[in-house]
Image: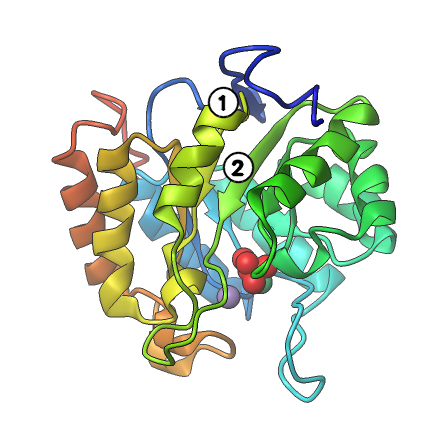
Amino acid sequence: MYRLVSKERRDRSVVSVAGRVRIGEGGFTVIAGPCAVESREQIERTAAHVARKGATMLRGGAYKPRTSPYSFQGLGDAGVEMIARASSACGIPAVVEALSERELPLLAQRVAMIQIGARNMQNFALLRAVAKAGLPILLKRGPAATLDELLYAAEYIVLEGNEQIVLCERGVRGFDPHTRNLLDLAGALRLKELTHLPVIVDPSHATGRRSLVGPLAVAAAAAGLDGVMVEVHPEPETARSDAEQALDFAMFDAMMEAIARTGRLPAGKVSVAACR
Ligand code: PEP
Ligand code: MN
């Protein structure tokens, strides 16, 4: 059994990011940003906008796990530098995915949280290595992984001494091409019954369609989950990856207003007026 992540060991754990964001404490964490960091201007504009509108964390991929080797692979180390600057300028901690062990030292130095993507959920060597990077970890569920497999993957990380893990349901493979994946909301809620770790959902990769992202984020908030991660781009039609699922700024704002109506956003959160 996954003893260490089990609900029997503890009722709930809170994951602290950069000493500023507390995930799993009862509020609803909103992590927003582009699929991939594409330029300084793109990540800075996005960071400024989402921070001002109440996002708690910034996302943006630098090393992209693309299905086709011919697709844009991300800006690599230069992308990490860009998101790190945008993050500190706007006072909003950043999460970036690691694809391999090589990237861990730079990420550990420059960002606040490391993501392990769906494709690497059972890369056990990477799980062991990321546990030792000294940062909290966002662990995404594989598109065909059972809840038990996800929990065992988290158990690998805890066994290496790192309990700061947030689980993310990002859609499982379905049969209908109208949505990219199926958002397993019931599975995410079941996880909350099985583990003390915080659980968030990613309606962007789950649906592949921007029109469905906001409503599912609201559903996750209303259902009592711990947060969402959504893709936002200043000009979605030009995005170099996942263009169809990126929210523009107006859609992001509408989503934030709808989430606020659930009463799950931290009350009286001071918004950042402008980034440095
Ligand atoms: C991502 O969040 O950038 C990503 C690639 O998602 P996933 O690993 O869930 O496909
Ligand atoms: Mn993406």
Q: Are marks 1 and 2 in contact (CB under 8 Å)?
A: yes
Q: Residue at x 43, y 34 (%)?
A: 190
Q: Residue at x 46, y 66 (%)?
A: 42
* Residue 90 visible in rendering: no
* Residue 45 visible in rendering: yes
Neighbourhood count class around disc 2 (C-alpha, 10 Å): few under 14, some 14–19, many 20 upward? many
Q: Quadrant of residue 178?
A: bottom left
| Left or right: where 160 falls relative to 81 | right
Image location (x, y in percent) of residue 276: 44, 42
Identify the secondary structure beneath mark 2: loop
Vertical arrangement, residue 114 with respect to residue 27, above or below: below
> Residue type at mark 1?
Arg
Q: Relative to the observer, which residue lies in front, 245 or 155?
A: 155
The residue sitting at the left extreme is 261
Identify the secondary structure beneath mark 1: loop
Q: Relative to the observer, which residue lies in front, 258 or 121?
A: 121
Image location (x, y in percent) of residue 220: 30, 41
Vertical arrangement, residue 80 with respect to residue 219, above or below: below
Q: Quadrant of residue 144?
A: bottom right
| Distance Cα–Cα, label 1 vs label 2 | 8 Å
Q: Residue at x 66, y 84 (%)?
A: 68
- The residue identified by callout 1 is 20
| Label disc, if present, on residue 93 of the rendered structure | 2
